[in-house]
Image (spheres, rainbow, N blue to C red):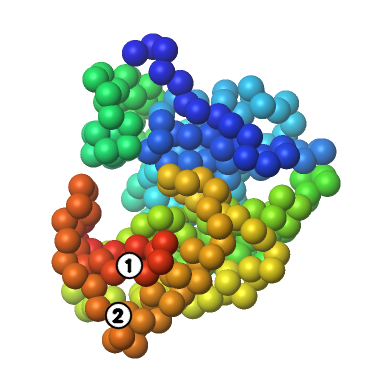
Amino acid sequence: MDSIKKEIKAIADNVWLISDYYLDNYYLVVGNSKAALIDTGCGIGNAMEEVRTLTDLPVEVLLTHGHLDHNGGMFSFSTCYMHKDDDTLSREHFGKNSSRKWYIETRVPVRFPGEGHVEALVAQLPLEDNQKHFSYEPINNGDVWDLGGCELEAIHTPGHSPGSVCFLDKKSRILFSGDTVNNQIIIPNKPEGIEKELCIYRDSIARIWSRANEFDKLAMGHEGPLVHKAIIKDYLDLANGIIEGSIVGQYEEIGIRKGVVARLGAAELWYRCDA
């Protein structure tokens, strides 16, 4: 199992996908003066070592949100940029090998099946457990990172998490959507209901759809990676339909997911989701 490696492939000029053994995606965008790493995976191996196979330029780390499968590799870096609304979430998720191990054990059989894969990936987790939470600079909606010859713009898109952010690269015409838009989206169930969360998510989807003339493809946090931007309109129509009552989902259990799910076009929205 020593031979298994992460897939790294160019998806545009000076833009690379680093596949975290198909469990999640993170991306490197390289400009003329510096580079940006968008997310860091769940912490399998050293993300900085992977980056250094592609560029020697200074690297800014930009997190789409604070979940463990996106901030887990931050032990390789001293600081990053993250929206402050995900501070509590990130502190709950980061630095626990027990959580990383759970993530590997539950996702690998579905996304990276193979004999010995679970053990091989667990063996790559950092030795330090309960690492101190990383420092970060807060992201504000509209912030821009000039990499030299290309820029990344932050668009605050709460819904999947309070501090979720998408990053727009107008040069490559790619929107890095994190978990704001994937092939499947989860809105966890809450005792008080999920109507407010659905409206927040719908408004975020409307926000990025209003910018659709500035990009063609999405680079997603899972699967994909590149999908046509039309999936955003599917999610917008689906969320509106659920909120207005014209679309009603059904309870399903598929793999690790259990909850009410509705589908429209390429969109699949799990709401009132218990797992």
**Front residue of this view, candidates 59 and 2:** 2
Q: Where does residue 73 sit, x and y in percent of width and height? A: 47, 35
- The residue under the point 17% across, 61% down is 252
Classify the position of the N terminus by image quarter. Answer: top left
- The residue under the point 39% across, 25% down is 126
- Identify the secondary structure beneath mark 2: loop
Amino acid type assigned to the residue bearing label 2 in the image: Ile
Q: Residue furthest front?
A: 265
Q: Does the image show residue 190?
A: no
Give residue 151's mark: none
The residue where tag 1 is placed is: 263
Q: Does the image show residue 157?
A: yes
Tell me if residue 108 comes above or below residue 169 in the rendering. Answer: above
Contact check, label 2 and label 1, Cβ < 8 Å? no
Q: Where does residue 245 sit, x and y in percent of width and height? A: 29, 86
Q: Residue furthest top?
A: 2
The residue where tag 2 is placed is: 247
Q: Where does residue 104 sit, x and y in percent of width and height? A: 29, 34
Mark 1 surroundings within 10 Å by alpha-carbon count, few (fewer than 14), some (14 through 19), many (20 or more): some
Q: How many marks?
A: 2
Quadrant of the rendered structure where residue 10 is? Answer: top right
Amino acid type assigned to the residue bearing label 1 in the image: Arg
- Identify the secondary structure beneath mark 1: strand
Identify the mark nearer the N-term, 2 or 1.
2
Q: Where does residue 9 sit, x and y in percent of width and height? A: 58, 32
Mark 2 surroundings within 10 Å by alpha-carbon count, few (fewer than 14), some (14 through 19), many (20 or more): some
Classify the position of the C terminus by image quarter. Answer: bottom left
50 horizontally vs 143: left or right = left
125 horizontally vs 147: left or right = left
Q: CA distance from mark 2 to mark 1?
A: 9 Å
- The residue under the point 23% across, 64% down is 273
